[in-house]
C-alpha cells in the first residue's frame, strides 16, 4: 500500500470515528428539549407593541405610583431572574420588559439589534408607561449600561438611576473588561469541551418553536455551564458559578452576539456610553457585589466618578447577581436610596 492510500485510509477512519462518536453522543443526550415560545406565538404572554416590535412585559403596582422601568442584562436575558424586585410594587409602578430579540420578546432581523434601536425602544416604553413625567431606570449589567446611555442622551426623561454593576461604560474600562475576561474566551480544558459538546447537542435536539430556538437554547446551555474556566467565573464568589442567580426562560443568542459584536471588538468599545451624563440632574445608586473580581467594587468606583450625584453601595457576600443572591440587602439599599 503506497503512502497516499495510507493517508486516505487514515483520514477515512478518522472521519468515520468522528461520525460514530457524534452519533453516540446524539443518542446519549436524547430527551425533551423544550424552548418557550415568544410573544409572537403565545397569546397567553403579557405583551405590548412598541416601536414596531412586540415586547414581553410585566406591569405591577399602583398606576398612580412613580414608575420604575427594569432593564435585564445579557444582552439577551429575560427579566425573570429579577423577580425579587417585584417587592417594590408596594410603592412603585414596576415595568419589566424583555428587550427586542431577547427573552420572550419577538425575534427581529439582525440589523435591528443595535444600541440605537434599543435606546429607541426604551424611549417608547417610557412614552407608553410614564407619559409626561420622568421615570426611574433600574438596570442590571448590560441593562445598567443601556440605562446609562439613555440617560446621558435624555436626562430629562429620568428621575433617578439604579445601576447594578454595569459592565463597562467607557472605552478605557471596556479594555479592562476584555483583559480580565480573556477577550471573553474560555481556557481550553475538558470542562470547556464538555460544555461545548452539551451546547452542540442541545442545538441538534431542539426543533422549535421558531427558527431562533435552537441557537437560543445552545447559547443558554453554554453561558450557564458552571465552568471554573469560564471567562465570567470571576463574577461570582470563589469563582463558583453555582452561586449565580440567573434564572432564564429563554436567552436571545442573536441579540447577544450582534450587540456585543458591534459594540465590543478585540480592542474594546469605541463609544463612550456615559458621554453627556454630567447633565443628569437626578441621583444615581451604584450597586456592586464584593466578590466580583471583573466588574466589582474597583470598577464601580471608577464608574461612580462619572456621575454628578452618586452613591456606591457594596453588597457583602455577593457576586454579579447580587439582586438575587442577596435580595434583602439589595432591596434595602434601593429603598433607602429612592426614599431620600
Image: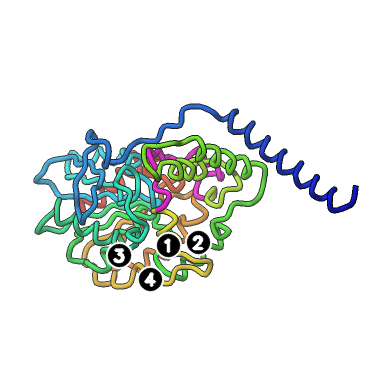
Q: Earlier in the sequence, mark 1 or mark 3?
A: 3
**Between marks 1 and 3, how big is the CA–CA gap?**
17 Å
Q: Which mark identifies residue 28?
A: none
123 vs 324, left or right, is left
Residue that label 4 marks: 272
Residue at 26% from the left image edge and 43% from the top image edge:
56
Decide whether residue 41 is among the magenta residues. no
**Between marks 4 and 1, how big is the CA–CA gap?**
9 Å
Residue that label 2 marks: 177
* Rendered-image quadrant of the C terminus: bottom left
Q: Camera-side residue: 121 or 132?
A: 121
Whether label 2 touches label 4, CB < 8 Å: no
Residue at 50% from the left image edge and 40% from the top image edge:
203
**Between marks 2 and 4, how big is the CA–CA gap?**
14 Å
Mark 2, mark 3: which one is toward the viewer?
3
Q: Which range is magenta?
A: 235-254
Residue that label 1 marks: 168
Whether label 1 touches label 2, CB < 8 Å: yes
**Between marks 2 and 3, how big is the CA–CA gap?**
22 Å
Amino acid at each position: 500500500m503506497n503512502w497516499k492510500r495510507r493517508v486516505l485510509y487514515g483520514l477515512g477512519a478518522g472521519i468515520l470515528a468522528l461520525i460514530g462518536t457524534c452519533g453516540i453522543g446524539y443518542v446519549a443526550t436524547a430527551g425533551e428539549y423544550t424552548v418557550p415560545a415568544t410573544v409572537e406565538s403565545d397569546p397567553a404572554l403579557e405583551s405590548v407593541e412598541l416601536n414596531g416590535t412586540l415586547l414581553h412585559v410585566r406591569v405591577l403596582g399602583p398606576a398612580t405610583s412613580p414608575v420604575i422601568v427594569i432593564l435585564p442584562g445579557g444582552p439577551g436575558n429575560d427579566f425573570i431572574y429579577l423577580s425579587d424586585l417585584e417587592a417594590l410594587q408596594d410603592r412603585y409602578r414596576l415595568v419589566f420588559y424583555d428587550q427586542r430579540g431577547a427573552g420572550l420578546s419577538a425575534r427581529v432581523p439582525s440589523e435591528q439589534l443595535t444600541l440605537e434601536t434599543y435606546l429607541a425602544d426604551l424611549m417608547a416604553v417610557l412614552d407608553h408607561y410614564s407619559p409626561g413625567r420622568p421615570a426611574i431606570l433600574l438596570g442590571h449589567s448590560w441593562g445598567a449600561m443601556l440605562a446609562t446611555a439613555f440617560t446621558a442622551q435624555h436626562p430629562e426623561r429620568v428621575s433617578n438611576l439604579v445601576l447594578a454593576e454595569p459592565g463597562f461604560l467607557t472605552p478605557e474600562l471596556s479594555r479592562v473588561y476584555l483583559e480580565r475576561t480573556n477577550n471573553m474566551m474560555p481556557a481550553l480544558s475538558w470542562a470547556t469541551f464538555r460544555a461545548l459538546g452539551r451546547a452542540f447537542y442541545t442545538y441538534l435536539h431542539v426543533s422549535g418553536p421558531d427558527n431562533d430556538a435552537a441557537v437560543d437554547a445552545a447559547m443558554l446551555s453554554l453561558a450557564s455551564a458552571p465552568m471554573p474556566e469560564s471567562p465570567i467565573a470571576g463574577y461570582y464568589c470563589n469563582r463558583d458559578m453555582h452561586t449565580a442567580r440567573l434564572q432564564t426562560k429563554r436567552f436571545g443568542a442573536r441579540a447577544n452576539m450582534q450587540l456585543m459584536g458591534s459594540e465590543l471588538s478585540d480592542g474594546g468599545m469605541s463609544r463612550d456610553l456615559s458621554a453627556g451624563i454630567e447633565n443628569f440632574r437626578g441621583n444615581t445608586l451604584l450597586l456592586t457585589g464584593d466578590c466580583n473580581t471583573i466588574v466589582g467594587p474597583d470598577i464601580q468606583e471608577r464608574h461612580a466618578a462619572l456621575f454628578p450625584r452618586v452613591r456606591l453601595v457594596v453588597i457583602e457576600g455577593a457576586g454579579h447577581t447580587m439582586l438575587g443572591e442577596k435580595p434583602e440587602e439589595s432591596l434595602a439599599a434601593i429603598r433607602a436610596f429612592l426614599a431620600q
